[in-house]
Image: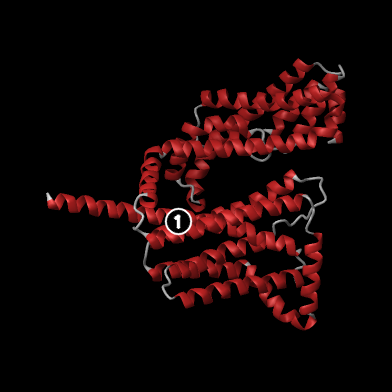
Amino acid sequence: MQGIIQLLHDYSYLTIFIALLIELICVPIPNEALLSYVGILSFHGKMNLWLSLLSAGSGGVIGATISYWIGYKLGVPFFQRFGRYMHMGPERLARISQWYRKYGKVLLIFSFFIPGIRHIASIISGVIRLPFRSFCLFAYLGVFFWTSTFISLGFVLGPQWDKYQGDLKKWLVLASIVLGIILLCSILIKKNKVYIKESLLLLFQAVFKRYKSFLKIKLFLFIILAAFISLATLMAGMIQDFIGNEFHSFDTISRAIILFLFDNRWQTVLQSISALASWKVLGAGVILTAITIFITNRDRWLELLFLGLSLTGGILFTYGVRWLLHFMLAGYYVSGDFPNGQSMKALIILGYFVMMLVRHQKNYLIVTIEWFLFLFVLLIYAVSGVRILHIQPSDLFAGYVFGAVWVSGIMLALELFRFLGIVKKSEQRIVLSRLCKK
């Protein structure tokens, strides 16, 4: 960064232009800091604000355009030839292209605020052959919006920028992520508006108007909903305690108890137990889950679909929430392993497996035994994690809570889909019986 600052003092507007150009051709440069510093120099009259905005925007525009044409010229042949090995064959690429032409243009505007995303957004636009006019309109608008935001913030805050720049950058990134999620949800809702409306109406009628129907399913849904809300509330409380650095006593006492109860004689056993979170064991858990779903032979494709959602979404949730927490709390004295990723993944995979075992089991004694065995496995892994892997107890427990929130949310969605299918079949039977009577 010091080298770029020196170049900025020597060559001013040319440095801004080149820095923005090469960053948007996939060369990572901390340009938010550079742009804000340009704003500070403009505040002090050492640079012209309008020329700075023009130089930064022009460099970003040319860099984004070059990236677009790189993707346009090289991307399609590459995916046509090798895409099938990455599940991105011609047919899927065509579907993504259609979706991106319809919705991706608006997302381009905000993609430049997110590090890592802005480096590939233009290339993806070229790969899927987004019309160049559409790309120019939205990408160029996004580039100027991004560059002018940081230059303007540096100019407005002036010498106080150093005091606020870290927090401003964090909140801008967070706002961009939240806005992106809101846009994605609104797109999905708009695309499936009729289906969602009909489904919500059927669920409302089944839950609140047919009081004596589907009692067991309603009770099961209520239990999962209560568990999800309770766990989500606990997760929010843990994040608050984590920010306040209030886990010290819990960690000290928990570690002391574990070290007292499990001395060196347990070393070999605990080392074996610590492998429960390895990918080999978790992979075996996924295979066992799939086998269990096939054996039960009830809603197997729906349960397999949600197994895939649980795994892919769970991994994204694990890394995403950890990245977001540590990004937002950078500079604070907090644990770097909150929530623990291995315990999150272990609970997500093993938790879904146990839910598939319990879901179709009619013997309540066996259900109780299965739950106690699951809790026992989590407990002994927690002991080995603290004793052998030296994980902070609060980080490990947080991993369990965050993972449980994800699994309970997935199970709630699965049961709602299952219940909706049952309600639809019931409606169809009623309609058929009425037709037969006529």
Residue 38 appears left or right of 110: right
Percent from the top left, x then y, of residue 385?
72, 69
Q: Residue at x 47, y 50 (%)?
A: 84
Name the kind of residue labelled 1 in the image: Leu
- Secondary structure under the numbered disc 1 in the rendered image: helix
Percent from the top left, x then y, of residue 270?
71, 77
Q: Which is more toward the observer, 54 or 109?
A: 109
The vertical placement of 233 against 50, above or below, is: below
Percent from the top left, x then y, of residue 242?
75, 53
Q: Which is more toward the observer, 316 or 433?
A: 433
Splitting the image into 4 quarters, where does residue 297 fall?
bottom left
The vertical placement of 347 against 330, above or below, is: below
Q: How was this image coloured?
A: secondary structure
Note whether residue 314 is visible. no
Percent from the top left, x then y, of residue 173?
68, 37
The vertical placement of 127 against 205, above or below, is: above
Task: Name the residue furthest left.
Answer: 438
Packing grade of label 1 (10 A; few <14, some 14-19, many >=20) is some
Give the residue number, with chain letter if any, for mark 1. Answer: 414
Image quadrant containing the N terminus: top right
Q: Residue at x 55, y 34 (%)?
A: 125
Splitting the image into 4 quarters, where does residue 112 fall?
top right
